[in-house]
Image (cartoon, grey):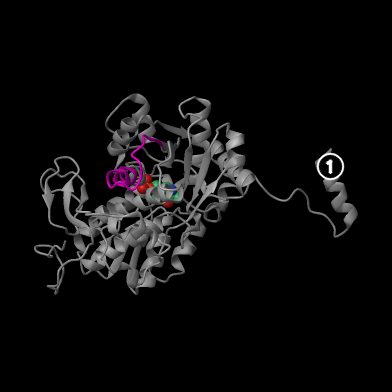
C-alpha cells in the first residue's frame, strides 16, 4: 500500500512517499492518527507518536532470503521498499552467542549474549540511525543531526558520511575522548556543549524547531528511529530458530530500545513468525542514573528526572522520554528493573570478558551486573532461557577499566623473569 506525501513536508517532490508497510503515525496515548510526517508529538494530546503499519503477509522465507543486515526485516520497518539499493551502513545480523561459561558463573541454565558490538560503529545505535536516515531521506532531508552521549554521535556521523549527507552532532563536553575522536573522524560538524546530556537534548529540541531542514534522529524523526531497535528483537528470535526467549535483559537510557524489543516480539507473534510464547522483559540501569528503576521499585507510573552521575555515560539520561512506557512493558510482561553501582559495572565488564571473550562498554557492564543481581535476588528465573543485550564496545570506554586491569608484571626479556612471574601467579 502506498501513501502520498499529502500535507507532509517533502520539499519539491510530488512522488508518493514510500515508507514500506508504514501507513500513519499515532499518538501513544489516544491512538489518534496523523499522516506520515517528520513529527514526534501528537497534535491531539502532545503524547509521543509511533508508527502504524499495514503489514499484509510476511513469511519467514522472505526474511531469510533478504540481505545479512537489518534490511532483511524491511517488511516490518518504516523504510522504502528498495532500501537495499540505497547507501547505508547496513547494520545488524550481529552474533547471538551461547554463553555457557557465563551461565555457569551466574548459576543459570541457558544463557545467550546478543553481541551488538559487531555493528559498523560498534553499538546498537547503528540500527536506529539507519532506519531514521532511510525515513528522513524519503521526507526530503539531507542533513542528519542529533544530541548524543557518544554512541549515537558515532552512528550519525558515519551514516551521514556513507549517505553523502552533512551531519550536525551535539555532545556534552565531558564525553569520553574515544567517543569524540570516533565521531570527529567522519568529518561532519561536531559541537561540544558545556552541560550534561539533558542540557544538550534541550538545546537540540530548540534547534530542531529552528532548522526544519535538519533531521534530528531522536527528535523530529524519533518515531522512525525507535523502530530500528525492533531489529534487535527480530534477530534474537530468528537466531534462536524462530522462537522467543523466556527472559531478556535490556539496558535503559531513554527506554526506547526496551519498549521496541517488546514490540518486536509481539509483532513476530501476531504475524505468526514465532509461537507467541510468554516472555519477561527486564530493565538495567546504573544507580548513578536510575530514574526508571526507582519508579519501578516505588510502584510509580511516572518517572522523576535525576541528575546523572555514573561511569555508564551512554545510559546517562536523567529524564528518559520512554520511561513510563518502559514501566508498562516491564510490568505487563512480569519482569523487573534493577540498578547497579559503578563498581558492579566494572565487575560486569570484566566478568563478560573473562567468561565469554566479549569486551563490552559500561552499558554492557550494567546489563551483566544487573542480570547477576536479578538472579541473586530471585527475580530472574535461573531455569528460564535468558538473553542479555550487550549493546556497545569496550574500546570506547577504556577509562572505566584503566585502573582495574593491566599487565601482571613488567619484566626484562628473559625466560627466567617470565617463569618467576608465572611461579608467583601459580603459587
Ligand atoms: C543508547 C544506548 C542504549 C539505550 O538506548 P535507549 O533506547 O535510549 O534506552 C543502550 N546501550 C548503549 C550502548 C547505548 O548507546
Name the one closer to the observer, 392 or 16: 16
From the top left corner, tell me how far across and down residue 6 is, in percent. 9, 64
At x 31% / y 55%, what residue is drawn?
A: 59
Q: Quadrant of residue 308?
A: top left
Q: Is residue 350 above or below residue 170?
A: above
> Which residue range is magenta in the image?
263-282
Q: Quadrant of residue 76?
A: bottom left
Q: Is mark 1 within 8 Å of ligand 1?
A: no
Residue 225 falls inside the magenta stretch: no
Q: Is residue 324 above or below residue 413?
A: above
From the top left corner, tell me how far across and down residue 186 is, in percent. 43, 70
From the top left corner, tell me how far across and down residue 18 is, in percent. 20, 65
The 10 Å Cα crowd at callout 1, few under 14, some 14 to 19, many 20 or more, is few
Quadrant that contains the C terminus = top right
Q: Is residue 86 above or below residue 148?
A: below
Q: Is residue 347 above or below residue 114?
A: above
Q: Is residue 213 visible?
A: no
Q: Is residue 248 left or right of residue 32?
A: right
Label 1: element kind: helix
Q: Residue furthest right?
A: 416
Q: Is residue 374 left or right of residue 424?
A: left
Q: Quadrant of residue 165?
A: bottom left
Residue 266 falls inside the magenta stretch: yes
User: What residue is shown with label 1?
Assistant: 424
Q: Is residue 348 visible?
A: yes
Q: Is residue 99 left or right of residue 333?
A: right
Q: How many numbered markers are drawn?
A: 1
Quadrant that contains the N terminus = bottom left
Name the one closer to the observer, 110 or 80: 110
From the top left corner, tell me how far across and down residue 182 is, in percent. 48, 63
Amino acid at each position: 500500500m502506498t501513501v502520498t506525501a499529502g500535507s507532509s513536508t517533502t520539499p519539491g517532490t510530488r512522488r508518493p512517499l514510500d515508507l514500506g508497510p508504514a501507513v500513519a503515525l499515532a499518538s501513544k496515548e489516544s491512538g489518534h492518527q496523523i499522516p506520515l510526517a517528520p513529527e514526534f508529538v501528537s497534535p491531539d494530546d502532545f503524547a509521543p507518536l509511533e508508527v502504524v503499519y499495514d503489514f499484509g503477509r510476511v513469511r519467514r522465507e522472505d526474511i531469510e532470503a533478504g540481505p545479512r543486515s537489518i534490511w532483511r526485516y524491511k517488511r516490518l520497518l518504516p523504510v522504502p521498499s528498495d532500501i537495499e539499493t540505497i547507501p547505508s551502513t547496513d547494520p545488524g545480523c550481529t552474533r547471538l552467542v551461547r554463553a555457557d561459561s557465563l551461565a555457569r558463573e551466574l548459576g543459570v541454565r541457558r544463557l545467550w549474549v546478543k553481541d551488538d558490538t559487531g555493528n559498523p560503529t560498534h553499538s546498537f545505535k547503528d540500527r536506529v540511525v539507519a532506519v531514521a536516515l532511510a525515513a528522513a531521506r524519503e521526507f526530503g532531508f539531507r542533513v542528519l543531526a542529533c544530541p548524543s552521549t557518544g554512541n549515537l554521535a558515532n552512528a550519525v556521523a558515519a551514516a551521514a558520511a556513507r549517505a553523502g549527507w552533512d551531519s550536525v552532532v551535539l555532545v556534552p563536553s565531558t564525553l569520553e575522548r574515544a567517543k569524540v575522536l570516533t565521531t570527529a573522524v567522519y568529518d561532519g560538524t561536531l559541537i561540544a556543549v558545556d552541560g550534561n546530556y539533558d542540557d544538550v537534548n534541550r538545546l537540540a529540541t530548540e534547534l530542531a524547531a529552528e532548522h526544519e531542514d535538519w533531521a534530528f534522529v531522536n527528535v523530529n524523526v524519533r518515531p522512525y528511529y525507535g523502530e530500528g531497535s525492533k531489529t534487535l528483537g527480530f534477530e534474537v528470535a530468528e537466531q534462536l530458530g524462530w522462537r522467543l526467549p523466556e527472559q531478556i535483559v535490556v539496558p535503559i537510557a531513554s527506554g526506547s530500545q526496551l519498549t521496541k524489543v517488546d514490540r518486536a516480539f509481539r509483532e513476530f507473534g501476531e504475524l505468526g513468525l514465532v509461537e507467541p510464547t510468554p516472555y519477561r522483559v527486564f530493565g538495567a540501569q546504573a544507580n548513578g542514573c536510575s530514574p526508571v528503576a526507582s519508579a519501578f521499585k516505588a510502584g510509580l507510573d511516572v518517572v522523576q528526572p535525576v541528575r546523572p552521575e555514573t561511569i555508564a555515560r551512554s545510559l546517562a539520561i536523567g529524564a528518559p522520554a520512554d520511561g513510563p512506557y518502559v514501566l508498562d512493558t516491564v510490568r505487563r510482561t512480569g519482569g523487573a528493573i534493577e540498578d547497579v553501582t559503578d563498581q558492579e559495572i566494572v565487575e560486569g565488564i570484566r566478568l563478560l570478558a573473562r567468561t565469554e571473550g566479549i569486551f563490552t562498554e559500561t552499558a554492557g557492564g550494567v546489563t551483566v551486573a544487573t542480570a547477576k543481581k536479578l538472579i541473586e535476588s530471585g527475580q530472574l528465573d535461573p531455569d528460564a532461557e535468558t538473553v542479555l543485550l550487550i549493546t556497545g564496545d569496550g574500546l570506547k570506554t577504556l577509562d572505566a577499566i584503566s585502573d582495574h586491569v593491566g599487565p601482571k608484571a613488567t619484566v626484562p626479556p628473559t625466560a627466567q623473569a617470565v617463569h618467576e612471574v608465572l611461579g608467583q601467579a601459580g603459587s
